Image (spheres, coloured by chain):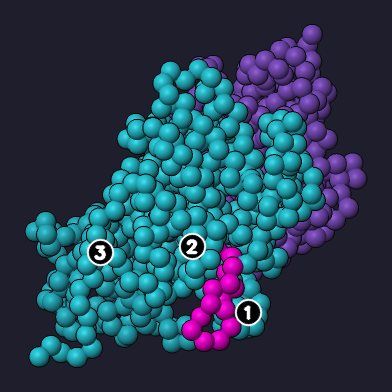
Chain colours: A purple, B cyan
Amino acid sequence: MTAATTMTQEPVGTAPDVVHAFAASPRYADEPIYLSARDSGLWRSDDGGLSFDHVYASPVPGRPVTATCIAFAPNFASSGIVFAGAAGAMLRSHDAGRRWRAIALPAPPPLVTCLTISPDYDEDGVILAGTLEDGVLRSDDRGERWRRWNFGLLDLTVYCLAASPGYATNETLLAGTETTLFRSENGGRSWRETAFPESAAPVLALAIGHDDTIWAGTEHHGIWQSSDHGATWRGSDQGFITGAVNELVLAEGFSLAVLPDMILVAGHPEWDWRPALTGLGDGGGCPRGAIAGLAAPSGIGPDATLLVQQRDGLVRRLRISDQD
Amino acid sequence: MSSLNGNGNGRQRPGVRGQPEVGQALWRGVSQIAAAVRPTLGPTSRLVAVSRPSGAPELLDSGATIVRRLIALPEHDANVGAMLARAVIWQTHEAVADGTATAAVIFEQAVASGLRALAAGADPWTLRRQLECVSARIDAELAAMARPVAGKARLTRLALLLCHDPELAPLIGEILDVVGPDGQVEIHAAPGRRCGRDYAEGMHWPGGVVSPQFITDQASRRVALTDCGILISDLDLSDPTEIRLILDQARAAGLGALVITAQRLSDAAIGALLTDPLPAFAVTLPGAGETARMVAQQDLAVLTGGQVFSRAAGDTARQITPSSFGQARIAWADRDLFGLIGGKGDPRALRRHIAGLRAALADGRDRESVARVRERLSKLLGGSATLHIGGATATEIETRKENATRAVTVLRGILIDGVVPGAGGAYLACRRSLLAATSVATTEAERTALQLAIAALEAPARAIIANASHEPAAILARCERAGPGFGFDTVTGQVVDLAAAGLHDSAAVARAAVRIALTAAGQALTIDTVVSPRSPATATTPLA
């Protein structure tokens, strides 16, 4: 990927209600599964987003459960395990998202906003969930039982979580909240605030590179980077990053940032963000046209195919091309 | 050696005594106390037996406990020195809960060297001032030498070195890894032999429901409300109309439940609260004493985002508005305690408040005020840990509790200030720079103070080596030849790289021990005269 990398897009499919998250299985038998978390529950596509099946609505007829976030287990290809956060519950599937079971969370029922699964999930069974007003929930038995672990987490509104690629040895996690960024070095049992500038918060997206560089996407203040475990931060100074950075995806040699109406790309090691694709919303800044999530089932690289789903359900296929 | 237990049989000789008698007696007292605690230094230390009026002697390995058994030396003239040494040990224990024997042997050597210097003509006050300068220099070197410690595995290893209890050490290591240096840790006796730990969310204060009628869950004997408002006050609510007013304001704020903190509620006011459809309960003010209640209210206000209504400020219930209430995700109370989980105050304000408390902790000189600030801080950090200690007998449980308490205190210091090379190696490393400073000292007093400190800093390593039945001089020479950072591992009998071998001491303890010992030595060397007053006449029957 170079500074000349571009993306093209075409609409693929639609959906009837508001989409909150969209994700693809990592290389599932070369036929990726796409899951969409919506107001009406969970939807599943195995035809590249052309059509979706409603795979989870609610245990109570007529009372749909809003699904908010999705996370595929690192061993999904062999286990078929997926987790989804919802309003008041955790959802788990063992068959690649076809059937789901709701798992109770500690009362009062929290609204799950984000999930992160330990890269060493096979061994430790650890999953963490961020919530809107109850801090972080942690399970160490593959999602069966959950409890709140908020020692030192002085802001309980958690928007995003990220696990270090070296989690198996360093147990390091980050939590992005309404007012700052917190760091845990004991697998999420306790937290300490980093030196992330309060004025740049809320933090909506996080990613940690293999060199422990931290990337934080914010609501109004662009993208921030730290190379010293959060002790000091550098903000992106490109004026065009005006919207909320909802997702950050790190790949070999470059990274993507997903905003409501555009996707940015930055090449390594310059880390100079520029628009790769714009106008993905309806062009008028309508919230329902905002990008809800980006799926990259076969990774991100030259000639890769990605899917994005908008909040109004429209799915678009993106192709990355290198124009040297 | 004289018995160290009881008052002895000697009568005090009233009068005024000067040098050289005072110096000699001082030395006798100091050395006896140091000799009593020196065997407890190091990993291959020995026990000290303290005789009792009847029964088996008490076997002790803690310098602070040993000197607590000491009332006075039989030889009264030596008692001045003994009590000075006792004070050094006790001050060190109070400051850092460890390092008492280290402080004692440094004090002993400093006094010995100091008395020789005085006999050679050194001025005691000049020597004292120079000692204070050298002490500050050593403190700075130890601080620079310190390395941070983190992680459950390292904390567990250090806990094992401190408490020598393989069952307790991993529990203590885990607890400190979770709650951190400022978190609340409670240590309780457990039924049975096993030890365990658990964690509680949120914070709690003493002061439960004002009436048992508020208890809704009879099984757990508590009441709990979710997404509730909190009225923070010390008002005396005796009029039911005031309660109705407060409830109306809570409803106007859109609150689905309410907790009222107050100084007192009348029976009529309690009745008004119980009969209202809005779920609510009332608790007595958290905190014992007016100051404690005031700071608890301040903390509650920051935690929940509410206002404090205070009688002292002339506040009344009629001033309460919908925006007055704090909020929390869960509030609970039983007959003795009131607690919150998930306060909804401004996180930025909470962080500033906590930073202020941390600064107060760093500045605190009074041990009691430091303890109060630490308790407030630990409540605000979002949870607490409880360590349950079991044992075969009540005595075993008490001993394990003492060891655990000491280990937790020392580990807190380690998390804050880090570790330095152990086995006396940190002090030996400081000697090198003091030796270099000696050659460029500008005054004789400065040179004397440096030399005194150099000799004193060797004392802990000597004692540790001797306690392991090795010849100190030969071993110390080998350590010197090996270079900085090397010391003697008494378990393996080898001179090792202390950091690589995992032999560490708490930096806070090392710094406190040498600081207290050298400061006390400087003071002791300025004692020129001892006055022994006549003992008053005593009788067991009233005077006629």
Identify whether B458 is placed above or below B155: above
Name the residue tied to disc 1. B391
- Which quadrant would residue B484 be assigned to in this image? top right
Q: Are marks 3 and 2 on the same chain?
A: yes
Q: Is residue A292 left or right of residue B327?
A: right
Q: Is residue A29 left or right of residue A55?
A: right
- Amino acid found under the numbered disc labelled 2: Ala
Residue B316 in the image: state x and y as whole percent: 11, 63
Q: From the viewer's side, name the closer residue of B159 and A144.
A: B159
Q: Main secondary structure of the magenta part?
A: loop
The numbered mark, 3 or 1, whose residue comes first in the sequence reads 3
Residue drawn 56% across the image and 22% down it: B436
Q: From the viewer's side, name the closer residue of B432 and B342.
A: B432
| Label 3 CA crowd tier, 10 Å (few <14, some 14–19, many 20+) | few
Residue drawn 73% across the image and 23% down it: A254
Residue drawn 48% across the image and 44% down it: B112
- Amino acid found under the numbered disc labelled 3: Pro
| Label 1 CA crowd tier, 10 Å (few <14, some 14–19, many 20+) | some
- Amino acid found under the numbered disc labelled 1: Gly
Question: Within the magenta stretch, is there residue B58?
Answer: yes
Q: Are marks 1 and 2 on the same chain?
A: yes
Q: How far is disc 3 from disc 1 in space, using C-alphas?
A: 50 Å
**What range of the chain is rendered magenta?**
B48-62
Name the residue tied to disc 2. B64
The chain that hosts pointer 1 is B
